[in-house]
Image: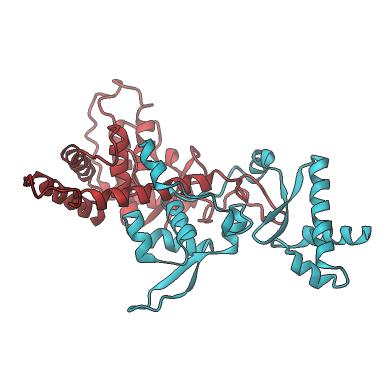
Chain colours: A cyan, B red
Amino acid sequence: MEENKTIIEALIFASDNPLSADRVAEIIPDVKKDEINRLIRELMREYEERRGGLYIQEVAGGFQFRSRENLGSWINRMKGGKSLMLSPAAMETLAVVAYRQPVVKAEIDRVRGVDVSGSLRGLLEKKFVRIMGRKDVPGKPIIYGTTKKFLEVFNLKDLSELPTLRELKDLKNET
Amino acid sequence: MGYEIKLDIFEGPLDLLLYLIRKNEIDIYNIPIALITEQYLAHLDMMRSLNLDLAGEYLVLASTLLHIKSKMLLPVEEDEHDEDEPDPRDELVRQLLEYQQFKEAALKLETRPLLNRDVFKRGFIAETGADYDDQEMAVELNVFDLVEAFHKIISTVEKGDSLEIDVEKMSLTEKMNDIMERLTEKGDLTFAELLGVSGSKMMLLYTFLAILELMRQRMIRVYQGCSFGVIRVCLAVEA
């Protein structure tokens, strides 16, 4: 049993993308799903207790080794201080897509009050947003949604983990 | 310095309107339309005076504001005025609140521990050194950022020591060619390198204008690797 845990640890380490428990079950078929999940939780706890530079994050439907958040500045120093950044316009467009998906461009334009062609193209290129299909209305407009990469980069297990939008009533009270 | 440039960057007409509402500490459900319209139009004038391409959306909202204002000026007959009469501002308020919701959500998302910014995974291809073509990492700058950077540089030029006007003939085209030549030679240069801090104010201005013109013609691109980082200029098309 101990051995299965080390196999899973190695799999998570070697996987390019967040590794799901289902995928682990495919690779080591003679272990039950429940057992796999239990072993992953155990691994996560071990890394937590060790308080080292690494931990296992549950993200985008799987598990992934990551460096601890408080060490980010060191890694950025190693990489030359460049960091991933989206412009405020791109972030706003991404937020509308994330919360309103599946969504057509006209709707994003309307919410933001500007033409979002540019930022939408950028998000598609960066693979944060994908084309989900076409809406069955005249003109067959393209429907957009977010990608797995969006979940991975923004540290979300799934879309239900998106921070809740503030109620319009609350907005009123503060302004 | 004799002049001061202070411009907030807006993500669109709704953003500008929200800014004005916040600045004036106005209740969003009871917007004094006359005041806000006046300030909104004043901002548009300022943007226009800087020769910025005003996106059509700004004008659409301006006309919406004027339309609401005119509607509110119309007298409402006493007995006809009941609670069912919709406030002409309702639609705009709804739109503003909705936009504000997403603007906040965007800010909130950005504070999460982001991959490749705060946390890192194995196998992340470390990008070091001079790979500035990577658009994913570098932020493309707009005119506002450049104006601000220029302001910073020109404020370091000693005041008063070069009052003599040099009648050296300079042309914008010449300066532009000069910049293009230097960029072709070096690949990329920092904004400060291009301006050459030692030059006279006149020279600085010419160089700055040339950079703006080249940007407009999409001959060059201007990037910043990280906030407050060095601004880099490179050719738009690899020579």
At horizontal 15% and vertical 39% (from top left) the residue drawn is B34
Give the quadrant of the N terminus of chain A: bottom right
Give the quadrant of the C terminus of chain A: top left
Q: Count the labels in the image.
A: 0
Foreground pick, A58 / A173: A173
Where, by quadrant of the figure, is residue A74 drawn?
top right
In the displayed orientation, state which residue is furthest to the front.
B79
Query: Is A74 left, or right, of A167 in this rendering?
Result: right
Foreground pick, A18 / B118: A18
Measured from the top left, where is residue A41 in percent x and y? 79, 53
Measured from the top left, where is residue B211 in percent x and y? 34, 47
Q: Does residue A40 appear anywhere in the picture?
A: yes
Query: Is B126 left, or right, of A52 in this rendering?
Result: left
In the displayed orientation, state which residue is furthest to the top.
B160
At horizontal 7% and vertical 44% (from top left) the residue drawn is B78
Measured from the top left, where is residue B131 in percent x and y? 57, 53
Foreground pick, A97 / A14: A97
Where, by quadrant of the figure, is residue B30 drawn?
top left
Measured from the top left, where is residue B163 in percent x and y? 25, 23
